[in-house]
Amino acid sequence: MVEELPKILGHIETMETLDLEGVEPTSHVVQLENVLREDVPRPSLPVEKALEQAPDPQPGGFGVPSPGRS
Amino acid sequence: MSADLLALSGAEAGALVRAGELSATELFEFWRERAAGDELGSYLWVADGPEGDPPAGSALGGVPVAVKDLFCVEGVPSAAASRILEGYRPPYSATAVTRLREAGAPVLGKTNQDEFAMGSSTENSGFGPVRNPWDPERVPGGSSGGSAAAVAAGTAPWAIGTDTGGSIRQPAALCGVVGLKPTYGAVSRHGMIAFASSLDQCGPLTRNVADAALLTAALVGRDPCDSTSLEHPEGVTLPTAERLEGVRVGIWGFEEEGLDPGVAEQCRRAVALAEELGATVEEIELPHAPHAISAYYVIAPAEASANLARYDGVRYGRRTESDDLLEMYERTRHDYFGEEVRRRIMIGTYALSSGYYEAYYGTAQKVRTRIVEDFRSAFERVDLVITPTSPTVAFKLGERVADPLSMYLSDFYTTPASLAGIPAISIPCGLSEGLPVGLQLIGPAFSESRVLDAAHALERAIGFEGVPRP
């Protein structure tokens, strides 16, 4: 990977040959602004179901090792 | 009866079920057996049985659909072919899957893919590669390689996949089937395991254009669960065109250095047929399209590096145990992400890092603007842009694995429409070296019906025969 990444970046850098002076960036092609919906409560995933796929489910939460050691 | 069922398109089989001449249960069982007998690695999971009778008179008539692994299906393994999600059974289903079920297409199975859709050969699957039904020594393309191979080999009547930079169109081309990437926003992304959110789009892989239209019509529409989805302003109608009179076609990319002469020849032959059908053809310029690969391989990895942060061994998926939290995160991601996924996370985080952001991500976003403008200018002169879909036919397994850049260049013709968010279809247009060649038709945003109509007329004129079956 040490050899591949510079090669890939080298290809990407060919973009620098373009004249992009004053061009606006595009982050998203669909022109959407502030898509809102009515603030109506609706049922969400039950807690048990949300925890079902976790590697270490705990009552009401996700179990993780201690964050304090490092 | 079995041989007859295999010969039917999705639309034809659905019509027989609606007419009461074929039972949906018998049809499902036929396809379930075909899928279970797959020997190409196309499937990661096959359903045990149907999900009950299809709604009466439903548009898709009970014809089962093969679904790319990255679509969440409630209670069904959905891992995006990544070891980090091995065994994950989502608590909900993707909107695309729900819409197809409601339209009468039950889930037949989950198809193999490149891990998190990152790849152009399906060799990056965490669960083994898929082989091309035309030649098992070759790749089916990717990332929706399982869906393409299943449709081509007749182990699925039709399928859905996702396309971020060509992941529906390129495997469709390499397997000799039809693949459509709809306009960005036309189909909900809710429940699709995310790769690059500003590009990902769901679409069909089918035997013919009419089937692609039928599935697309069922898939499109605004979904409150995806705020980037839109109501399709024109709707998607079934194709009927037999001629192309009055259609202005612009061709692009036929003189590219990396284009295989055999592929170019078949694509030129198809363009000549378009002219015979009444289309006017002219060469057009898309001056920034050759830079689409560079922009794409910054933007997609940048978005992926953010999207894949969620795989940390906490809420779902696999975990490598450690008594330290940070070490647990690091080991989990190291142990369960494949090499290509790690490579793209590194490129993406590098491109977004302070000091390099403007040079890479900022520049790529400006190139994206230029590509959008190139297409806008082109569509002032022509109705459709036609290009080859892939510069080569299917390559051999292992051939490009050691050289990621050569793999990325497979997407030369497909990334421009991805960055512009516009619809594009690949249809088979002939054989080169005994392997299928794909032709790409690109239209303006939300022009799906016109693109499908033109593809339908051309398909009839080309008369492509599917994969030879014993």
Image (cartoon, rainbow, N blue to C red):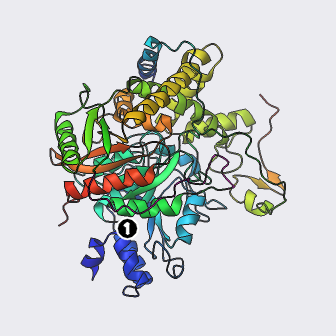
Q: Residues within 10 Å of mark 1 (few under 14, many from 20)?
A: many
Which residue in the protein does label 1 denote? Answer: B35
The residue at 67%/37% (across/down) is B329
A46 horizontally vs A17: left or right: right
* Amino acid type, mark 1: Ala
Residue B242's x, y, as percent? 27, 59
Can I make out residue B176 in this image? yes
- Expressed as whole percent of the image width and height from the top left, the position of residue A28 reads 60, 35
Let me know if residue B359 is in the magenta part. no
Q: Residue at x 34, y 59 (%)?
A: B209
The answer to which image quadrant residue B220 occupies is bottom right
Query: Is label 1 in a helix, a strand or a loop?
Result: helix
The residue furthest front is B246
Taking the image as shown, residue B195 lies to the left or right of residue B173, namely right
> Is B423 above or below relative to B235?
above
Which quadrant of the rendered structure holds the C terminus of chain B? bottom left
Q: In this view, does B331 lie to the left or right of B347?
A: right
Up the image or down, B357 lies above or below B330; here it is: above
Asked if the stretch drawn in magenta spans residue B241, the answer is yes
Q: Position of residue B358 (x, y in %)?
A: 60, 16
Left or right of B394 in this view: B157: right
Magenta span of residues: B224-244
